[in-house]
């Protein structure tokens, strides 16, 4: 999911752990400093390991980041740098065996992501069976549960399963601090739990074998009607369907969730959402969301 300094800081200020996306940042250090200026509390930064991120990681660590999350790859080559800076390494996994390998490589915290999750989905096992299997595999290493968690009941449930915390994405798309397009917000509020679909490679995220979960739209329907063809053979491929607020074009099949200021065919863009979407029914401040999520603890 998209994660910005303002939202991450608001989540941290509310007593949870905010996360910023650093994977595509031109200057990861600047993102960390911007977030740190908005909160005195800890926050983390996430890297998708589909390309080399040593430069971005060095920038982030130099700016003071001390909680680093990795997914979609082997973090081995980055762990020493984080530990040398006094930081903590988290890795998203989709199986108990992967969790064991992660801990053996030096990972400090394991994130067990069930396939109910929105956006990029790493594994194929649901959260309910995955979390206890991972907990048993790596105890006493802390485990964070992710995927399909949308309210206080879900948080309480994964704690009973043995996780030490819950990681939520879809619920925070409706945070007032999250600048998504109003059409996207309305789709999320109206969506049923059955709507978010798992796609093996619908949106061209830039690396192979990259399944993701999003709300269905005209782009998805045209692709499915054509038999789910690969890159280069997709209907409407390369068509400009929208523009960012900056004026930059967005082409069909590009992984570009509609943010505030986006214009054009908003419905045709990648509206990431997990199966917990039905539990997100109204915009709220990040602080109110955190308070509700922890109300049963």
Image (tube, rainbow, N blue to C red):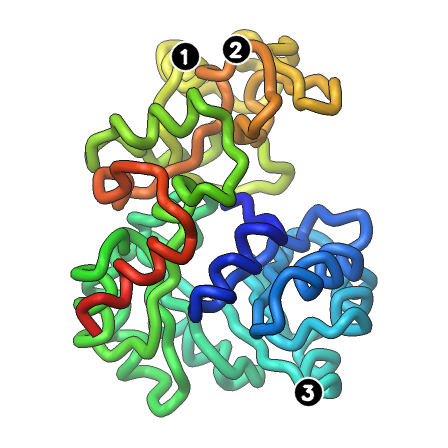
Q: Indicate which disc, 2 or 3, sits on the residue closer to the N terminus.
A: 3
Compute the Cα span from label 2 to label 1.
10 Å
| Residue 9 horizontal/vertical position (percent) | 57, 60
Tags 2 and 3 in contact by the CB under 8 Å rule?
Answer: no
Q: Indicate which disc, 2 or 1, sits on the residue closer to the N terminus.
A: 1
Residue at point 54% right, 44% down?
2
Front-lying residue, 162 or 94: 162
Q: Which residue is mark 3?
A: 86
Front-lying residue, 197 or 43: 43
* Disc marking residue 218: 1
Q: Which residue is mark 2?
A: 265
**Among the 4 quarters of the image, the one containing residue 287:** bottom left
Tags 3 and 1 in contact by the CB under 8 Å rule?
Answer: no
Q: Give the secondary structure at mark 2.
A: loop
Q: Give the secondary structure at mark 3.
A: loop
| Residue 82 horizontal/vertical position (percent) | 69, 79
Residue at point 39% right, 40% down?
174
Tags 2 and 1 in contact by the CB under 8 Å rule?
Answer: yes
Q: Indicate which disc, 3 or 1, sits on the residue closer to the N terminus.
A: 3
């Amino acid at each position: 999911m998209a994660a910005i300094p303002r939202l991450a800081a608001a989540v941290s200020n509310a007593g949870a752990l905010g996360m910023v996306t650093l994977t595509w940042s031109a200057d990861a250090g600047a993102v960390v400093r911007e977030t740190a200026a908005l909160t005195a509390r800890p926050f983390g930064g996430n890297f998708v390991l589909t390309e080399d991120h040593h430069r971005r990681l060095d920038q982030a660590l130099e700016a003071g980041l001390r909680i680093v999350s990795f997914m979609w790859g082997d973090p081995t080559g980055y762990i020493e740098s984080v530990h040398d800076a006094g930081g903590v390494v988290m890795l998203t996994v989709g199986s108990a065996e992967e969790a064991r390998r992660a801990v053996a490589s030096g990972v400090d915290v394991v994130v067990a992501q069930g396939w109910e999750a929105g956006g990029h989905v790493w594994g194929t096992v649901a959260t309910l069976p995955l979390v206890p299997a991972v907990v048993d595999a790596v105890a006493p290493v802390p485990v964070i549960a992710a995927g399909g968690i949308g309210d206080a009941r879900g948080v309480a449930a994964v704690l009973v399963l043995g996780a030490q915390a819950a990681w939520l994405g879809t619920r925070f798309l409706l945070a007032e601090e999250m600048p998504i397009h109003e059409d996207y917000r309305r789709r999320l509020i109206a969506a049923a739990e059955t709507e978010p679909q798992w796609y093996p490679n619908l949106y061209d995220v830039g690396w192979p074998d990259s399944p993701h979960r999003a709300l269905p739209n005209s782009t998805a329907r045209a692709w499915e009607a054509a038999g789910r063809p690969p890159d280069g053979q997709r209907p409407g491929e390369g068509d400009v369907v929208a523009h960012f607020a900056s004026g930059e074009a967005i082409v069909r099949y590009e992984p570009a969730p509609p943010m505030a200021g986006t214009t054009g065919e908003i419905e045709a863009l990648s509206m990431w959402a997990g199966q917990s979407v039905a539990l997100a029914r109204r915009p709220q401040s990040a602080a109110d969301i955190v308070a509700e999520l922890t109300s049963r603890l």
